[in-house]
Amino acid sequence: MSLARMIVDGWSWMVTRRCVEQKFFMRPDRRGVVANTYRYTLAHAAEETKVQLHAYVAMGNHTHAVVTDPPGAVAAFAGGFHGLFARIMNVHLGRKSNFFDGSCSYSGLHCVDAEDVLDRMVYVTTNPVAAGLVERPEDWPGAISLPEHFLEDAPPIVATRPTDLLRSRGRSEKQTQDARTRARGHRKPKDPLPDQVVVKLTIPAAYRYLGRKAFVALYRDRVNVRLEMLRDERERRADRKKRRVLGVEAIFRTLVNDAPKPKTAEQLAADQQRRLGDGLIPHIACKDTARRVAHKVGLRTFWRENRKSYEAFRGGKREEVFPAGTYGMARFQGVRVADAG
């Protein structure tokens, strides 16, 4: 049995999903089809689940989104977003098999404090630069959120319904609708997808007292600090070729069925050290050591209690109360869950 997800109302998360075999299925294209599809499915899922979106980026072979989850619906958000995006992208690429890695539904990193949320937002915004693809986040041709998107007078980020990709190939619109009606059978029909959606970015609650301009200045300063650090790291590399960024034209020329070279043991060790330095452990992002340890202990206690309740439920105790934060069993089996203390 895999470890249960602990999902509590109001927690903040960095939600990550990688393409199968790390292939570049999400590589940006010149027409902006991938970026528009990404923004459309992301915004639609956030609107449907009432999850607050703080930052996002669509890299060539993975996606990051930083969100706060007031209703405790982050799993439904990830499922709706990734599922619809994968189906549309498979049509775009002419594929039929898995789009995302199937080893887990998504990776959820719980951001414990406000500082950790902002830190993950900065990480997401600078991800294309850290990967050596572009000089600045603004140069990334794919979908990405920037600090200036939070300004009051910033133009709205509008994504349109990818109608040609949602319609089955070789069928008229009426034939497609008839086929969907037949396949739906006895199921309750869903509301049609909107023609367009607006990507709504929300300032994290702990920073709203600053106001939009002050928050954008803080966010941009943190981004600039990390960009300077990344440039210094690139300049210190011995190999001159590794000091260059790939560039937008080379990104467009990348084949979608390609994948990055496997990392060496030294690179994996360096990544691990960097994660520890950033206060990251599996499932938790927290720079405060004491709070990180406390949340780690709480998570292990939850797993232990959840497993105990699961075994009791399997044994026939249908009135078993599961620990607070239980999501899967509550949603799919309707079990009783203790109130969060």
Image (cartoon, helix red, strand yellow):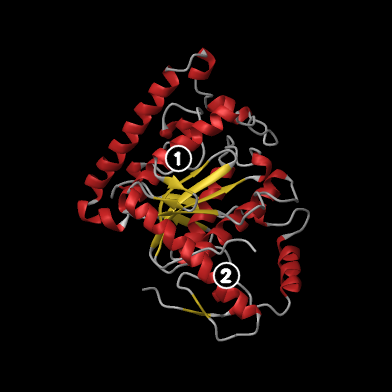
Position of residue 287 relative to residue 3, above or below, is above
Q: Position of residue 150 (x, y in %)?
A: 32, 48
Horizontal and vertical percent position of residue 178 = 74, 69
Report the residue at 62% width, 61% height from top: 2
Q: Which quarter of the rendering shows the C terminus?
A: bottom left
In the rendered image of this protein, does residue 245 appear above or below residue 51? above
The disc labelled 1 sits on which kind of residue? Arg
Residue indicated by mark 2:
307
Q: Which tag, 2 or 1, sits closer to the chain's start?
A: 1
> Residue, x 43% and y 65% (percent of image)?
50
Label 2 sits on a secondary structure element that is helix
Q: Residue at 52% across / 19% down in the picture? A: 242
The numbered mark at residue 275 is 1
Residue 174 seen from this side: yes
**Residue 12 found in image quarter:** bottom left
Q: Is the residue 229 above or below the residue 300 in the image?
A: above
